[in-house]
Image: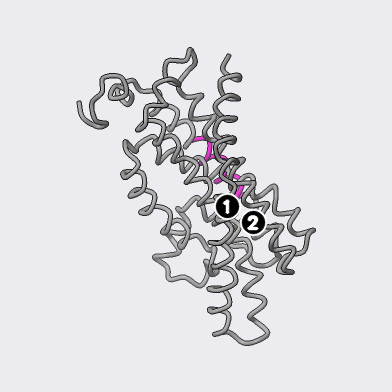
Amino acid sequence: MSWLAVKAVTRRELNKTFRQRGRLLSAMVRPLIWLLVIGSGVGSMLAIEQQSQYLQFLVPGVVAMTLLFAALLSALTLVYDKEFGVMRMMMIAPIAHGWIVVAKLIAAVIIAMVQAILLLLILVLIGLLDWQFALMLLAPAALTAVLCASMGALIAVWSHTLDNFAVIMNFVIFPVFFLSGALYPVTQLPDLLRYVVLVNPFSYGVDLLKHASQSGQADFSVTTDLMVIIVFSIVAVMVACWRFSRESVHEPLFRGSKPGKK
């Protein structure tokens, strides 16, 4: 019964997303702007022989950014369904409420990976990435997508409204991205910022992508990256499922009061 419910919720999320083809295509604009516009602008301050190297350095970070934004925005559906009443129908289903979070997370990972694959295809077509390196990035990208989706679920289960989720996401997403080593080597940061990078789980997803795309540019070991990604993802999903399963979280859905008020 549980796996059938997970399959149904996941299919609903995927159908809803893939019907919006413009959303998938427009999601390519942000990473390409960062890579081709901002990357070229910053690269213009470097020596000519270093400009192409910097663009190559940005590729793993831009792929990770695509996964981060896609997964966090997909997690928005948890809050959307609560605010517009769809969640009531899911909550009365005879399954543990945590499975709803798992289904949403699976859908977020798939959506993030589809967008990452589209980006990789574009990078191969414009000559910034070799197809062999693109294939090597798929497995690290999948693990990073799980990491980002678990972060999104963790934010969503503590958000009562869409506005609340948007505020929290904007407060989290930019520090998480900028302080991850996606745009510059971690070793060149001041000590204080370097410590922030070390406690940022997204940094290890970016670093794992660096290991797959180029040698000598990664900041941590592959073992460290895998351990942090796996442990954080498991803990985040467990906490999100526990939070979502609490009856007090869903009381407002059934008594008609505003979320967060008793």
Q: Tell me the residue that label 2 is attached to.
A: 209
Residue at image coords 70%, 54%: 137
Circle 1 Cα neighbour tier, 10 Å, few/some/many (<14 / 14–19 / ≥20): many
State the separation of the CA atoms marked 2 and 1: 6 Å
Disc 2 + disc 1, Cβ < 8 Å: yes
Residue at image coords 43%, 54%: 173
- Magenta residue check for 232: yes
- Magenta residue check for 172: no
Residue at image coords 32%, 24%: 253
In-image side of 251 versus 209 (left or right): left
Residue at image coords 39%, 22%: 88
Q: Position of residue 207 (x, y in %)?
A: 60, 57
Residue interval drawn in magenta: 223-235
Q: Tell me the residue that label 1 is attached to.
A: 205
Quarter placement of the N terminus:
top right
In-image side of 94 versus 15 (left or right): left
